[in-house]
Image (cartoon, helix red, strand yellow):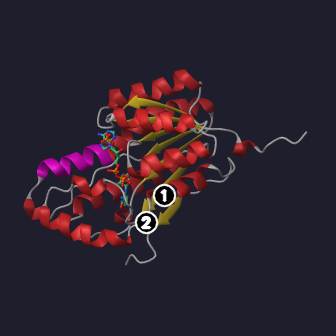
Amino acid sequence: MTLLPTTYAPKVVLITGASSGIGEATARRLAAAGHHLVLGARRTDRLAVLAKDIETDTGVAFPHVLDVTDPDSMQSFVSAAHDRYGRIDALVNNAGVMPLSRLDALKVDEWNRMIDVNLRGVLHGIAAVLPVMQAQGAGHIVNIASVSGLRVDPTAAVYSATKHAVRALSEGLRQESRELRVTVISPGLTRSELTETISDQDTKDAVAGQMGIAIPAAAIGEAVHYAISQPADVDVNEIVVRPTAQG
Ligand code: NDP
């Protein structure tokens, strides 16, 4: 009898922001690979449709309401997953918003929103799964950052700050643990609903002008799948995936 390598065993994977874009594409890719998913976001109607789609294709997924800015909501998301499957192999911290604008537009509420979702949301996810993963002696945290975590552009100062912070805290987490795998995936321009969070019309128009070269969200889902499917002793720490035509 030939046993499958353990790396191909189904994993229990939680995905935040699974209701659209990269989160949804990642869910579809991981479900196709046989992993068991827990899908989190605020738009539960979208999650329900996605979970049904996945189950129609013989995948395993269940939707759970999640607001990553609320630590209690994150805790109940993680607890529901753990109650259902008895373990958590990976958390994909994907939820994010990108209301770009120049700093002198003083959109302070939007700055705070980006910090709450893109940075605090990731920290809330880590806080909720870390005790479970430490008790298991294994686990994998995949944080979706951005090429804006590697560079800074006008109108993206606060967004870039949150993504630089995600890369920094990911490296700190990696250094603190010899049992957890930590991966940062930094997408470039990717087709999704992300630009809908931009309220500044000039910025929205400028970004729309760049989106012609954007790659499909499935390209990022493929990178998540690659990182997750490596053997337990192989920790893929950083992946940058951007359009060939992006400067
Ligand atoms: P989308 O807007 O399509 O998806 C964002 C997701 O985040 C949605 O599912 C949304 O769900 C969720 N979300 C937003 N706020 C919250 C919240 N408070 N609680 C829970 N979920 C929330 O954009 P993308 O797929 O592009 O974005 C995914 C990630 O990829 C983000 O972190 C983004 O910064 C990053 N990224 C994207 C790039 C791109 O070009 N598209 C480039 C670089 C990085 P809901 O509204 O239902 O809660």
Q: How many marks?
A: 2
Residue 146 in the image: state x and y as whole percent: 38, 60
* Residue 99 figure quarter: bottom left
Q: Amino acid at mark 1?
A: Ile
Q: Which mark is residue 220?
A: 1
* Residue 36 figure quarter: top right
Residue 38 in the image: state x and y as whole percent: 49, 34
Going by the image, does 1 lie left or right of 219? right
Going by the image, does 213 lie left or right of 218? left
The earlier-in-sequence mark between 1 and 2 is: 2
Relative depth, front residue between 142 and 24: 24
Task: Please determine whether, in this image, residue 194 is positioned above or below residue 67.
Answer: below
The residue drawn where x is 63% and y is 35% is 137
Badges 1 and 2: C-beta atoms under 8 Å apart?
yes
Residue 124 in the image: state x and y as whole percent: 37, 37
Q: Nearer the viewer, mark 1 or mark 2?
A: 2
The residue drawn where x is 61% and y is 31% is 136
Going by the image, does 170 lie left or right of 59? left
Task: Tell me if the residue at label 1 has its CB under 8 Å from ligand 1.
Answer: yes
* Residue 176 showing in the rendered view: no
Q: Residues within 10 Å of mark 2 (few under 14, many from 20)?
A: many
Name the magenta segment's main secondary structure: helix
Q: Amino acid at mark 2?
A: Ile
Q: Which mark is residue 215?
A: 2
Highlighted magenta segment, given as a residue range: 108-118
Task: Please determine whether, in this image, residue 150 is positioned above or below residue 175.
Answer: below
Which element carries disc 1, helix, strand or loop?
A: helix
Residue 232 in the image: state x and y as whole percent: 67, 47
